[in-house]
Image (tube, helix red, strand yellow):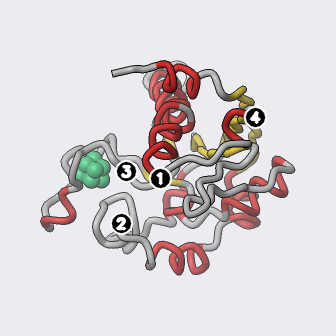
């Protein structure tokens, strides 16, 4: 149930959304290195446990060769002093993220899904999300069963080898800031990078 604190969290940020478009060949050449990202994926508990994460059964890099252009979409949530000057418990940080960052992620995914459903605008486009696919409560890969929704499964930029920090720094002039859960601190802004291949 919503309470006053949750309403305050909801109003605790302003949103910036910036989209940059470039040829996939250029992005792939300068910003994709699967050998680097896979090292990070290997220490994540989703590795080999989610069909949107490595190791992949097919040659996943062929995705990059299939499309001509990529829209890179950066969401930046700028938090106010109520968030940045207070300390929060781990549970409160999860609530804040759900109400702010993940809510904006859900909204942009809905927008992108609507876009790619329009055949006049896009023919066989592919959305690249952030984080692992969580369409199902429990990914079927954990039980060694096929993906339940292969057409809707969401790969993330990083799972396909995109160097996210390099992208945000060099293309969007924005450094990624991190939450410090041990100290209960949320930085002045948080970012999400998504993509649309078409
Ligand atoms: S759609 Fe479901 S089964 Fe398929 S990758 Fe996503 S969470 Fe896993």
User: Does the CB distance between marks 2 and 4 fall below 8 Å?
Assistant: no
- The residue to which callout 3 is attached is 133
* Front one among 100 and 122: 100
Q: SS of the residue at dot 2? A: loop
Q: Check mark 3 vs ligand 1: CB closer than 8 Å? yes or no.
A: yes
Tell me the residue that label 4 is attached to.
Answer: 81
Marks 1 and 3, how far apart at CA: 23 Å
Which comes before the other along the chain, label 1 or label 3?
Answer: 1
Q: From the image, tell me which residue sits under label 1.
A: 90
Measuring from the top left, give residue 67's x and y in whole percent: 58, 48
Rendered location of residue 162, percent (x, y): 62, 62
- SS class of the residue under badge 4? helix
Pointer 3: residues within 10 angstroms few (<14), some, or many (20+)? many
Q: Callout 1: few (<14), some (14-19), or many (20+) C-alpha neighbours within 10 Å?
A: some
Q: Look at the picture and state if 7 lies above or below 30.
A: above
Q: Position of residue 133 (x, y in %)?
A: 37, 50
Which of pointers 4 and 3 lies earlier in the amino acid sequence? Answer: 4
- Return the disc, 1 or 4, that comes first in the chain's sequence: 4
Residue in view at x 61 percent, y 60 percent: 183
């Amino acid at each position: 149930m919503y309470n006053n604190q949750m309403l305050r969290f909801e109003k605790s940020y302003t949103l910036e959304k910036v989209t940059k478009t470039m040829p996939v060949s250029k992005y792939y050449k300068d910003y994709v290195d699967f050998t680097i990202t896979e090292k990070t994926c290997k220490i994540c508990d989703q590795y080999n446990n989610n069909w949107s994460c490595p190791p992949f059964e097919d040659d996943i890099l062929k995705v990059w060769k299939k499309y001509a252009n990529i829209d890179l979409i950066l969401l930046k949530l700028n938090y106010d002093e109520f968030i940045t000057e207070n300390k929060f418990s781990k549970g409160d940080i999860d609530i804040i993220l759900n109400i702010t960052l993940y809510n904006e992620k859900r909204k942009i995914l809905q927008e992108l899904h609507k876009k790619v459903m329009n055949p006049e605008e896009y023919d066989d486009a592919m959305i690249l999300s952030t984080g692992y696919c969580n369409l199902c409560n429990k990914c079927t890969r954990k039980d060694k069963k096929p993906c339940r929704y292969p057409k809707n499964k969401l790969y993330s930029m990083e799972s396909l080898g995109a160097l996210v920090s390099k992208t945000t720094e060099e293309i969007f002039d924005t450094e990624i800031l991190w939450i410090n859960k041990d100290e209960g601190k949320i930085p002045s802004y948080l970012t999400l990078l998504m993509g649309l291949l078409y």
